[in-house]
Amino acid sequence: MRADVLVIGAGPAGIATAIAARLKGLRVTVADARRPPIDKPCGEGLLPEAVRSLRQLGIDLNQCSAFPLGGICFTDESSTASAVIPKRTAFGIRRTALHQLLIERALELGVSFHWGAQVTQHDPGCVRINGNLANYDWLVGADGLHSRVREWAGLNPRRKNHSRFGFRRHFELEPWTDIVQVYWGRRFELVVTPVSPAEVCVSFFTSDPTLRIDAGLAQFPSLAARFKHARALNSERGTVTSLLRPRAVCRGRLALVGDASCAVDGIAGQGMSLALQQALALAGALAGGNLNQYQAAHREICRIPVRLTRLLLAMDRSAWIRRKVLSLFAAMPPLFAKAIALHTNEPGRELFAAKDFFHLGWSFLHTR
């Protein structure tokens, strides 16, 4: 078997890379030890940049396939700050439903899949898939946080990454709002995302391995009351969520994409958006035969999301910082709206100018 591009990992990042590479005319093979449907606990909200990237891949979300989201709201025990997202630019969608849309698009374009595949014996220019030799011009590691491909390339981070725990569960419940609601509690964040007219996704992020979704709901009685009689559609699933950046994202004929290349903690809600943007940038670099182009694009794609994730993690670690930041945003709605526009990569995010950072910093230092 021979491919121009061999992708190891058939999650959204890997399939998106395969689609983008096929659109550039490259022959693509994808291999994964798992079989579809491939699921992963996550918040299941797609920010505007993710929706735009999917459109470039030929996948146009609408009300039939996903739930339109209208904004983001941050709430803690004393403050609430809300911001609007432009209509039909962000959607909630089940992870498995998105995965199926990506598979169907990839098959339509002629991507070759090897499901249940064991990839072994990596050598320059070839690997073995289920014992059979597979040659490639380019190898893409889309195999997640604990990437074997990243290890083969010698690109694992030098410093230990900061990890937390993420959990997710779906409930049969008519959404009472089209806004993604982020509740900041003691040592956790709980996120409620509508994913259909009759279903919501609850995701939960914490550094405490003993906490679960029910404990988070209990800290917000008005929210817990909404779920009191809601039927759980599945069991609570967990995963590890991290902020991780390797030494580089390419070496020789090998490149990394998705969580293998840059993982942001789940509270940022940016993982899917980053993966899709990276896939498009990588395909362009592969078609041009220049991975240095991808390294530069990847750095720019991740620059602001990584900084914002660090701020959110600081809010998680310090109740004082969290209360200060949320009270400031609640008192200054236009500033929060600009911050959300920056976070979601909406057009006009440059409107969060130096004077806004100065205003925020000054207010932070001079309020009780």
Image: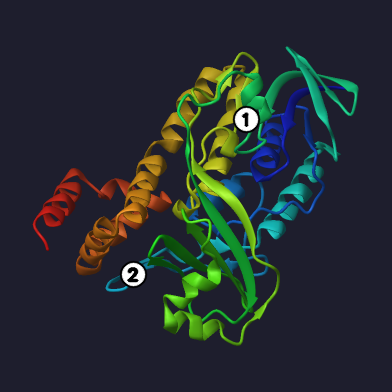
Q: Nearer the viewer, residue 241 or 187?
A: 187
Residue displayed at 59% across by 29% down: 282
Q: Residue 217: percent from the left, percent from the top?
A: 48, 75
Q: In the rendering, at what x and y percent does residue 121 appear? A: 80, 19
Tell me the residue that label 1 is attached to: 283
Looking at the picture, does residue 321 appear above or below residue 286? below
Q: Identify the element where label 1 is drawn.
A: helix
Q: Secondary structure at mark 2?
A: loop
Q: In the shown orientation, is residue 24 left or right of residue 263?
A: right
Q: What residue sits 53% from the left and 60% below the top?
A: 210
Residue 346 in sight from this viewpoint:
no
Identify residue type, mark 1: Ala
Q: Amino acid at mark 2?
A: Asp
Q: Nearer the viewer, mark 2 or mark 1?
A: 2
Is residue 240 placed above or below 329 in the rendered structure? Answer: above
Q: Quadrant of residue 25?
A: top right
Question: Callout 1 environment at 10 Å: few (<14), some (14 to 19), or many (20+)?
Answer: many
Residue furthest toward the front?
210
The quadrant in which the N terminus is found is top right
The spot of residue 272 in percent (x, y) is: 56, 48
Crowd rating for badge 2 (residues with CA inside 10 Å; few <14, some 14–19, many 20+): many
Query: Is residue 263 left or right of 148 when viewed as pictured?
Result: left
Total labels drawn = 2
- Residue at image mark 2: 76
Q: Is residue 214 left or right of residue 315?
A: right
The residue at the far left in this view is 366
Residue at 65% across / 16% down in the picture?
Answer: 253
Q: Quadrant of the C terminus?
A: bottom left
Q: Earlier in the sequence, mark 2 or mark 1?
A: 2
